[in-house]
Amino acid sequence: MKFPSTRIPVAAGLMILLCGASSAPAPTLAAPPIPASAGSTPEAGAAHAPDRFFYMFMVGSTRWPAVHELVPAPAAFSPRFGGRFQPWGWTIELAWQRRVREARGTGVFVGGDFGSFAHGSGWRNVGVDAFTGRPVRGEMFATAGHLTLSGRMVWREGKALTLHCASGAGLYLVRIKDNIEGTGMTETGNHAASPGGYVGAGLDRLVWRRAGIGLHIEGRVHVFEFDDLGPGFPGQRASGPLYQLAGALSFWS
């Protein structure tokens, strides 16, 4: 007995399967999820956490009671000066610090500060211009500054707010200068140096998180003692405390 050939039905079945497979849409494979790294959050790209370096540019006001107590010897100055320095002044300061330790949201930073204070006496008449006949004025300044090694502890309060406690120690200088109209600042030969330091506290808030830029406010108390200022202030000293309150731009990187 002969059986019918099965070649045609088998070939037809293969064609149907191939055509059906080519016309069906290919399944879409979803990419496997990428595991989040340890400590990352959904807002990690938007929020900037304080990192290794902290920079600050401060401008503010100072109060130095002792400088107001200085009584000059008028004849020791040319032009003569018999006024008093104002207890209120202004300050400008730069700070740079690096994180050396951090644990449980508390960071320890060390670095340095360079700052300057200026306390003026108010304008006084010092003579008459020989060409115009107009009065010439002058203003005496007690300009002090410091170069200090410093450290600060930083406590994080949320994503953008940090609390600061700072201190520093180093060299303090003071120079008495006369600002004469048409001449500019001139030295008077009265100056002194002293070791000193400060303690302070502040508050910082990040306002541009991606760039690590914040607004900072800080108060400090400086201590020093200038024993001998020079011939213009015989037997007198200008010591601390000097109180400082300043606002700043801060930079984290």
Image: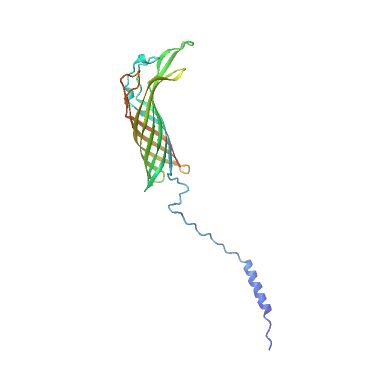
> For residue 241, which quarter of the picture?
top left
Q: Position of residue 50 (x, y in %)?
A: 42, 44
Task: Specify whether 174 is left or right of 9.
Answer: left
> For residue 53, which quarter of the picture?
top left
* Observer able to see residue 105: no
Q: Position of residue 229 (x, y in %)?
A: 35, 22
Seen from the viewer's position, the closer of residues 13 and 47 is 47
Task: Specify whether 132 is left or right of 166.
Answer: right
Seen from the viewer's position, the closer of residues 19 and 110 is 110
Question: Which residue is most to the bottom?
Answer: 1
Task: Specify whether 24 is left or right of 70.
Answer: right
User: What residue is at 65 percent from the left and 72 percent from the top?
Assistant: 16
Number of labels in the image equals: 0
Identify the colour scheme used: rainbow
Q: Position of residue 189 (x, y in %)?
A: 39, 19
Q: Position of residue 43 (x, y in %)?
A: 45, 49
